[in-house]
Amino acid sequence: MTAAADHSNTASAAAFAADAATASAAGDDPTPALGGATVLQVLPALGEGGGVERGTVEVARAIVAAGGRALVVSAGGPLVHDLARVGAAHHLLPVDSKNPVVMYRNIARLADLMRAEGVDIAHARSRAPAWSTLFAARRAGVRFVTTFHGTYGAGNFLKRRYNAVMGMGERVIAISRFIAGHAHRLYGVPAARLRVIHRGVDLERFDPRKVSAERVIALARAWQLPDGAPVVMLPGRLTRWKGQTVFIEAVARLGRRDIRALLVGSEQGRHEYRRELEKLILAHDLGGVVRIMDHCRDMAAAYMLSDVVVSASTDPEAFGRVVIEAQAMGRPVVATDHGGARETVVDDETGWRVPPGDVEALAAALAKALALGEDDRRRMAARAIDTVRANFSTRAMCERTLAVYREVLGPPAAA
């Protein structure tokens, strides 16, 4: 979805999203018991980089802690070991395939698994496996839940039809009010079936008190950062819609040679785009200021290194994990004023929101962030940390997801 489409949201859509959020809150139950239910989560693969994959492991852990059985089906990946550690079982199937023949065969495979394992709820987290899971759940008499993780491409009828499965759950979890409104407008998902559950931050991992000075110093040395240089960081894979070109132009407009501006994220095969960024850096004579770093394994330390963290996405983020991770670490953020950032950044309190693609506005916000005095920085950090802990924790995400499962299963039978 384009930024223009996001800004054209109607008042009725905003009201709808608020209704969906209210329904989510009404379904939130602090008592996590699942009564021995078996929940099967299905996603393409368990790579270690994405929020969907980590969220699957976190919810699996919560299911087990609540007395349920957690099963996951995927095509495998590094996080399979994490599932084992939290007491969940993994089943390997080619659910990452978009081949219609493979997807069709997966229906029988999943239905057999559901019957054999006594599955009560099947929770699909991606489109291709969701189609197979939907029909398998119908065959096996299993309740079906989905999570709507993104806007997805919807340029033609066939694409919209393919995407529509994410709105077919008995309950449809939307990861932001923005996504809830999108699911309603484009796919007709009613508020009665939508539940807004924001993605959560692992507050054990992203806690400034738990990041040692040694970790921060080691990363600064690895990145060859000079002592005392203010650091501005834009984390995110190298892809055009993440706004790296806007960021570079804004740093050039800022006109400061004493800072270090870091683009932290892997190119994931986008060699041409990386070369384009490198040429843009040289064109602005920013070779000593802007640097492209590969994927960082210690993002908590990376945030602690930073004086300001930026999300410059030109298309709206469905949620925007970077923004809440940085705020959890007490870092001021600058984010584009659309999508999930409108729900996670309190303008002028925990950071700033700027129009998407607006180089001048981004440069002005960076200047403001870098000029913060120590007292103002401390106050902003405290507000940011409090906001994340109150609204965007992993624990809250898991409790609300389990509440949806209990809602779908209905009240327990009388003794």
Image (cartoon, helix red, strand yellow):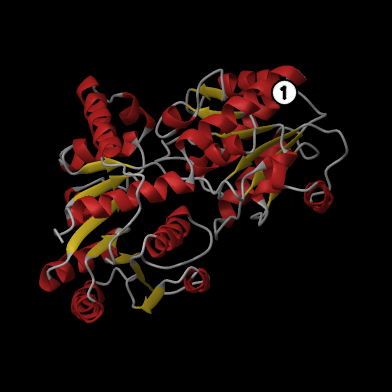
Q: Is residue 251 above or below residue 69?
A: above
- In the picture of the structure, the residue carrying the numbered disc 1 is 370
Query: Residue visible at 28% across and 39% down?
Result: 24
Query: Residue visible at 23% across and 63% down?
Result: 121
Query: Residue visible at 49% across and 65% down?
Result: 47
Q: Quadrant of residue 58?
A: bottom left
- 372, 288: nearer the viewer: 372
Tell me if I can see residue 148 in this picture.
no
Residue 243, position as x, y percentages in the image:
53, 37
Q: Is residue 323 left or right of residue 249?
A: left
Q: Is residue 250 left or right of residue 17?
A: right
Badge 1: few (under 14), some or many (20 or more) residues near its Cα, within 10 Å?
A: some
Residue 401, position as x, y percentages in the image:
33, 50
- 203, 137: nearer the viewer: 203
Q: Is residue 321 above or below residue 73?
A: above
Q: In the rendered view of the protein, which quadrant contains the C terminus?
A: bottom left
- Disc 1 marks a residue whose amino acid type is Leu
